[in-house]
């Protein structure tokens, strides 16, 4: 029997296009003899469209974007949306290939929990906490994980007294610093600031993408990442290093120009790797993660490590850091997808043991 796999992709997010590329890569990597693949496209406006059963690879993302005439708002989801071709059967598991808000942040995970459907990846808590960089960093601080200094603001606070916001950044962090939307990934809306003028423009840019922003102290360090895979007993991949050819690893460098080099495995010592491994597992467990995360670190010349963030649905094409890390660890892309599906089913089965009646 084939595994009936529902793929959720697109999404009402600034990372919509990234999600489409992820979906295309996953569909073409899956073994169509093992999986019955059902695409569910979420438009940028929020409507959901269930596409036809896929019986083979797809050439372009255009083939995964279905007609608006078939769309439904999430509030009017048809009972058949999460059913397989046989209307009496639901999907075996859902794979949310969604990056950013309205997909990676616990909202879709909450819907799937209410429907009691198995799904791949992190649950509601880990997804929502991992999406909000402020909440994530506060949890990491409570867990005793080393981090660079940071401050954060909501839009109304900044609008009422922007000079005080700028002064707080300068007093507590100084320059250079990085301004980021709190709830976004793929380096969207991020700016590096070296003076007040750049800081002002960075606040304006970041607040276009979120009502909350975070500002982090700049450090002179290497950017090293590990992939984490598992549920209650996670394990780490080899380490990889990002070496941007531009000033920092922004959206354009990631997805448009290719102005970056990924070095896998990273040239680090055994002690440095073991340090990062321990911190990555601690971060994974502190957020109660499951399935997968990519843990991102700053590593200084004197061997100090600071956790930057974890990404609960990292870039997932064959050329993205997370799959490449696991490829160099011995897990090829199709195997990685199948392993994640298995982990999602195992977590679902484990949660069915919970008693809900007294």
Image: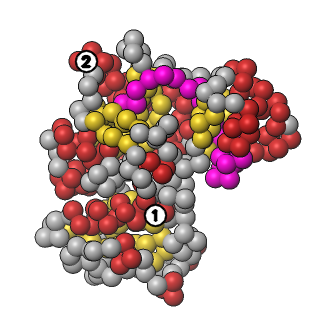
Name of the residue lying farthest toward the right: 160
> Where 7 falls versus 335 (above or below)?
below
Q: Residue, x 31% and y 25% (percent of image)?
A: 277
Quadrant for the N terminus, please. Answer: bottom left
The structure's colour scheme is: secondary structure
Callouts 1 and 2 close, C-beta under 8 Å: no
Q: Is residue 195 magenta?
A: no
Judging by the rendered image, the residue that carries numbered circle 2 is: 269
Quick one: label 1 or label 2, which is nearer the N terminus?
A: 1
Give left or right: position of 305 versus 153: left
Q: Nearer the viewer, residue 252 or 213?
A: 252
Q: Which residues are magenta?
A: 203-224
Name the image quarter holding residue 294: top left
In terms of depth relative to the viewer, which is nearer, 101 or 317? 317
| Camera-nearest residue between 25 and 244 | 244
Question: What residue is shown at x 53% (from left), y 79% (from top)?
Answer: 72
Q: Tell me which residue sits at (35%, 60%) in the image.
A: 22
Residue at the spot of label 1? 17
x then y, percent, for residue 189: 59, 48
Mark 1–mark 2 Cα distance, whole angstroms, equals 37 Å
Residue 4 visible in image: no
Asked whether residue 43 appears in the rendered view, the answer is yes
Determine the residue positioned at 54% across, 60% down.
Answer: 13
Q: Label 1's element?
A: helix
Task: Pinpoint residue 186: horizontal percent, then vertical percent.
Answer: 47, 49
Secondary structure, mark 2, is loop
Viewer-proximal residue, 237 or 198? 198
Q: Is residue 80 above or below residue 163?
A: below
């Amino acid at each position: 029997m084939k595994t009936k796999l529902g793929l959720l992709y697109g999404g009402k997010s600034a990372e919509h296009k990234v999600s489409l590329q992820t979906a295309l890569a996953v569909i073409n990597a899956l073994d169509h003899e093992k999986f019955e693949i059902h695409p569910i496209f979420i438009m940028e406006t929020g409507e959901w469209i269930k596409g036809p059963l896929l019986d083979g690879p797809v050439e372009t993302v255009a083939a995964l974007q279905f007609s608006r005439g078939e769309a439904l708002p999430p509030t009017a989801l048809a009972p058949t949306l999460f059913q397989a071709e046989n209307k009496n059967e639901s999907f075996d598991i859902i794979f949310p290939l969604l990056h950013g808000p309205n997909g990676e942040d616990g909202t879709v995970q909450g819907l799937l929990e209410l429907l009691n459907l198995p799904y791949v990846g992190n649950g509601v808590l880990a997804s929502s906490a991992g999406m909000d960089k402020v909440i994530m960093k506060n949890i990491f601080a409570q867990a005793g994980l080393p981090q660079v200094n940071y401050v954060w603001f909501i839009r109304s606070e900044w609008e009422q007294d922007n000079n005080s916001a700028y002064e707080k950044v300068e007093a507590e962090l100084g320059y250079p610093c990085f301004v980021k939307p709190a709830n976004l990934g793929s380096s969207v809306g991020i700016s590096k600031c070296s003076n007040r003028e750049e800081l002002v423009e960075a606040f304006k840019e970041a607040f276009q993408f979120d009502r909350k922003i975070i500002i982090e102290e700049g450090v002179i360090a290497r950017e090293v990442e590990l992939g984490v895979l598992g549920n209650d007993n996670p394990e780490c991949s080899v380490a990889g290093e990002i070496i941007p050819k531009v000033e920092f690893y922004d959206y354009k460098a990631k997805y448009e120009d290719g102005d970056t080099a990924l070095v896998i495995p990273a040239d680090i010592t055994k002690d440095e790797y073991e340090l990062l491994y321990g911190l990555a597992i601690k971060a994974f467990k502190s957020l109660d993660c499951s399935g997968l995360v990519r843990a991102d670190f700053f590593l200084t010349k004197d061997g100090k490590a600071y956790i930057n963030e974890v990404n609960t649905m990292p870039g997932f094409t064959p050329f993205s850091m997370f799959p490449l890390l696991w490829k160099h660890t011995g897990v090829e892309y199709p195997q990685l997808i199948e392993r994640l599906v298995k982990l999602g089913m195992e977590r679902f089965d484990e949660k069915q043991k919970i008693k809900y009646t007294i």
